[in-house]
Image (spheres, rainbow, N blue to C red):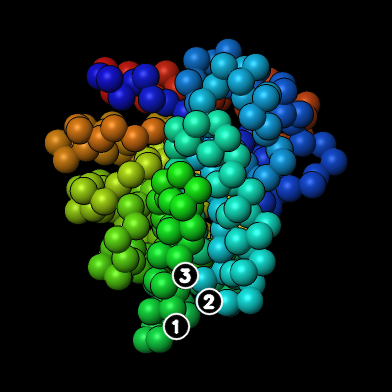
Amino acid sequence: MERSTRLASAPVTWGVWERTEGGADLIPAARLLETVSGLGFQGIELGPPNYLSPEALAAAGLDLVGGFAPLHLADGDAFRQDVADWLDPIAETLAATGARGPVVLADAETPERIAASARPAEQRRTALRGDALKRAFELVQEAAERCRSKGVGAVFHHHTATHFESPEEIAAFVEGTDVPLCFDTGHCAVGGGDPLELAREFAARIGHLHLKDVDPVLLERVRSGELSVEAAWDGGLFCPIGEGMVDIPAVLALPELQDFAGWIVLEQDRVSVRASDLDSVARVEAANLRYVQEALS
């Protein structure tokens, strides 16, 4: 399939993201890019601002295919700071590299929603409603328009530990905005959804696709209250593709997605990764890439 030429990685797969930003032993950007290119990926997402530079991406021969921007959609003051710290730098970097991918907007994690993650009753109790939900939609639309004004597209990522995690919350977002989705198979499953069912339902709104798998044993421990989602995340909640509960080949085979022309990003969100772990992570990512390529063929 033509889509097999549109496969990308992301720094979060290599332990570089907002949870680990500023760590002393992160994988150096140049080594990460060299490894990703050597594995056969055509692109990569940006990661935290200032981690990957346009010059380093060009030297590695990789397209910049998107950049994750967490925004506090339930806190207007924090939202304004997020625009300055995350949204604008990411949009400007994407524009500088040819705008080959979108800004991946998301609600920012909060302590309340971290505690509610993967637990339906708590998700419902802590959900945004009424004017607060309407205001969140307005802020997303504002952020998307700000990206477009810079010549960059925008999508919205439903995400674990945020106000847009559960199937009901994703459906409300689709109804309340016109911003395309970054559909994530793993975050969908953690949030209580069926990735196959929701990918089919929202196929027409998907502008960016994240593929990840989920360890069902760890997820059940989160749902039962035995384990926090943060501890599960650190323990490998997002497992190697093909080893968990998500039927990724079935998602990729959906008739509704056969005309999908965006980037397919392979992710295995990792927390505890040091520079010395590069080779072991690369071996897993090589297997993940082969798995997806075979599913696409």
Question: Decide: marks 1, 2 in contact (CB < 8 A)?
Answer: yes
Question: Decide: marks 2, 3 in contact (CB < 8 A)?
Answer: no
Tell me the distance, in whole angstroms, between the alpha carbons under discs 3 and 1: 11 Å
Residue 116 screen position, x and y as percent: 51, 72
Q: Amino acid at mark 2?
A: Ala
Is 130 above or below relative to 99? below
Q: Which mark is residue 74?
A: 2
Categorize mark 3 by other alpha carbons within 10 Å: few (<14), some (14-19), many (20+): many
Position of the C terminus by quadrant: top left
Q: Residue furthest right?
A: 24
Q: Amino acid at mark 1?
A: Ala
The quarter holding residue 293 reads top left
The residue beneath circle 3 is 139
Q: Earlier in the sequence, mark 2 or mark 3?
A: 2
Residue 106 screen position, x and y as percent: 49, 58
The quarter holding residue 290 reads top left
Residue 197 screen position, x and y as percent: 22, 51
Q: Amino acid at mark 3?
A: Leu
Tell me the distance, in whole angstroms, between the alpha carbons under discs 2 and 3: 9 Å
Q: Earlier in the sequence, mark 3 or mark 1?
A: 1
Q: Which mark is residue 132?
A: 1
Categorize mark 2 by other alpha carbons within 10 Å: few (<14), some (14-19), many (20+): some
